[in-house]
């Protein structure tokens, strides 16, 4: 009935294909993700006070994360992400332990179209810092 039995080549091949499929799906990135080297090169061009238009010229692949209308003006947030492989856990909160892929998110905050802050996700600037 079974040509190779449970321990034969058929089982080994299926296990290999399954492992490969799990590995590939665990490394899935989005169309917005950058390579680490590209991010590090582009972030050097970012300056506090730069316009959103100039920022988009540096990082065209941003994801909008919302806005907050305040008395000082409109604060908007945009995200830039990149993935990289690390054999050892680096402490990054967004890590796929199976594949070793870590995802780094950086949020950029604008007040009326001018960059005022960037850094950790969801670290919205307080009114005192505007």
Image (cartoon, rainbow, N blue to C red):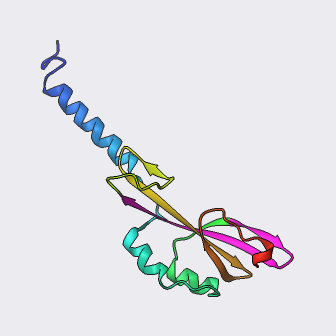
Above or below for 11 versus 27? above
- Looking at the figure, which quarter contains the N terminus? top left
Please tell me whether the stretch drawn in magenta is mainly helix, strand or loop: strand
Question: Can I make out residue 29 in this image?
Answer: no
Total marks in image:
0
Rendered location of residue 39, percent (x, y): 44, 73
Identified at 32% across, 42% down, the residue is 21
Rendered location of residue 123, percent (x, y): 67, 65
70 in magenta: yes
- Quarter-of-image position of residue 46: bottom right
Above or below for 93 versus 120? above
Identified at 50% across, 82% down, the residue is 58
Rendered location of residue 85, percent (x, y): 35, 57
Question: Can I make out residue 58 in this image?
Answer: yes
Q: In this view, does 88 lie to the left or right of 129?
A: left
Above or below for 90 versus 110? above
Residues 66 and 107: in front is: 107
Residues 124 and 18: in front is: 124
Identified at 78% across, 68% down, the residue is 68
Q: Give the range drawn in magenta.
A: 66-85
Q: In this view, does 108 lie to the left or right of 112?
A: left
């Amino acid at each position: 009935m079974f040509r190779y039995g449970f321990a034969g080549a058929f089982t080994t091949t299926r296990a290999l294909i399954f492992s490969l499929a799990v590995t590939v799906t665990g490394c899935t990135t989005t169309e917005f993700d950058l390579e680490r080297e590209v991010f590090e090169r582009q972030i050097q061009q970012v300056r506090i006070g730069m316009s959103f238009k100039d920022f988009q010229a540096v990082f065209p692949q941003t994801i909008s994360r919302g806005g907050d209308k305040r008395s000082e003006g409109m604060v908007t947030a945009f995200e830039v992400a990149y993935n990289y492989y690390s054999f050892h856990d680096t402490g990054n909160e967004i890590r796929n332990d199976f594949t070793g892929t870590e995802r780094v998110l950086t949020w950029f905050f604008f007040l009326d179209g001018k960059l005022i802050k960037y850094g950790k996700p969801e670290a919205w600037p307080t009114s005192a810092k505007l």
